[in-house]
Amino acid sequence: MVAEAIVFLDEKGGVAKTTTTKLISQDLNSRDYKVCAIDMDGQCNFTMASGIPIDTEKNIYTVLRKESDAIDSIVSTDSGDILPGSPMMKNWEAESAGLKDSMIRLGNRLEPINEYYDFMLFDTPPFLGTSTSSTLLANKKIFVVIPTTPNDFGVMGVIDTIEDIEAIKDSYGIFGVDIQIAGIVITQVNRGSSLSRKSIKQKEAREAVKRIEEIAEKHGTRVFDQYLYVNQQYIDFVAKRENVFTSTKYDVPKKEIRRVTDELLEVIGKGK
């Protein structure tokens, strides 16, 4: 068994990227898949949302520095296994600049645990430094999910992200990694009177979604049919560090992320 690698990536912050990563990790775990989420972001939001202290001795930073092995650095939770982040990842960009293996070190360091999991999920920082770009070379096959918001900033974030993914493909094609954009998830959508696309009332939002759909089609990918709507439950589950699939309090994110995960599994080839 070799894990499917899914990178959650958007160069614009504030798009619910960590929330989306966390929910899909919980969902896959609830379906009895073996999941490991890797927190690449020096802000450590995924780690904190999982109830793991950010000063944990062994983490992705120590793994990259070869001070600990991945298998010994993983923390098990009710949402699946997690390789914690570290605030020291903010230093990794400068530290890795002089390394000959900077772009492939992540994949090499994670290779020993690849066979233990069905899925490895990467929560990335909102910029394309080494810590982000190296996730795109961390496995032989990479699926990218781009969470974004339905506004002009979201559109620009999608454009920049896709352009940089294409640049990575061109620059590092020698490594033979197959990078596929699995799809774009529209998040933080204000709900109207129904669940249809017409429920996005704001003109800006409708126009932004249309532009994102055009961008997706141009680059051979898709916008997921299911949106993630604005709802207090999304904020609460993160703040309270809870699992929406083991709690009875989060029916909205549970239902919506189920549909997103179904679509994602279909793209990956593991759908029903």
Image (cartoon, helix red, strand yellow):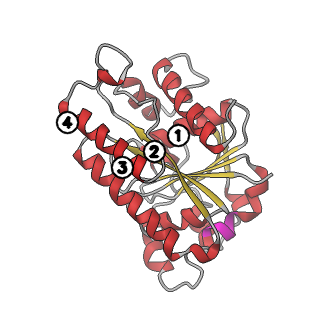
Q: Residue at x 57, y 21 (%)?
A: 247
**Mark 3 or mark 4, which has the lower sequence index?**
4
Question: Callout 4, which amino acid?
Answer: Glu
**Label number found at residue 204:** 4
Mark 1 closeness class: few <14, some 14–19, many ≥20 residues within 10 Å: many
Q: CA distance from mark 3 to mark 2?
A: 23 Å
For marks 4 and 2, give the one nearer the viewer. 4
Instruction: Please provide the residue range marked out in magenta.
Output: 106-110
For marks 3 and 4, give the one nearer the viewer. 3
Mark 4 closeness class: few <14, some 14–19, many ≥20 residues within 10 Å: few
**Mark 4 or mark 2, which has the lower sequence index?**
2
Q: Residue at x 64, y 36 (%)?
A: 28
Q: Nearer the viewer, residue 127 or 241?
A: 127
Say which residue label 3 marks. Answer: 215
Residue 117 in the image: x percent, y percent? 74, 49
Secondary structure state at the residue bearing disc 2: helix
In the picture, which quadrant includes the C terminus? top right
Say which residue label 1 marks. Answer: 22
Q: CA distance from mark 1 to mark 2?
A: 6 Å
The reply to whether the C-beta atoms of the residues labelled 1 and 2 are less than 8 Å apart is yes
Mark 3 closeness class: few <14, some 14–19, many ≥20 residues within 10 Å: some
Residue 4 in the image: x percent, y percent? 67, 50
Residue 107 in the image: x percent, y percent? 65, 67
For marks 3 and 2, give the one nearer the viewer. 3
Above or below residue 24? Residue 167 is below
Q: CA distance from mark 1 to mark 4?
A: 28 Å
Q: From this viewpoint, which residue is outermost toward the top? A: 193
The reply to whether the C-beta atoms of the residues labelled 1 and 3 are less than 8 Å apart is no
Q: CA distance from mark 1 to mark 3?
A: 26 Å
Question: Callout 2, which amino acid?
Answer: Thr
Residue 239 in the image: x percent, y percent? 42, 34
Say which residue label 2 marks. Answer: 18
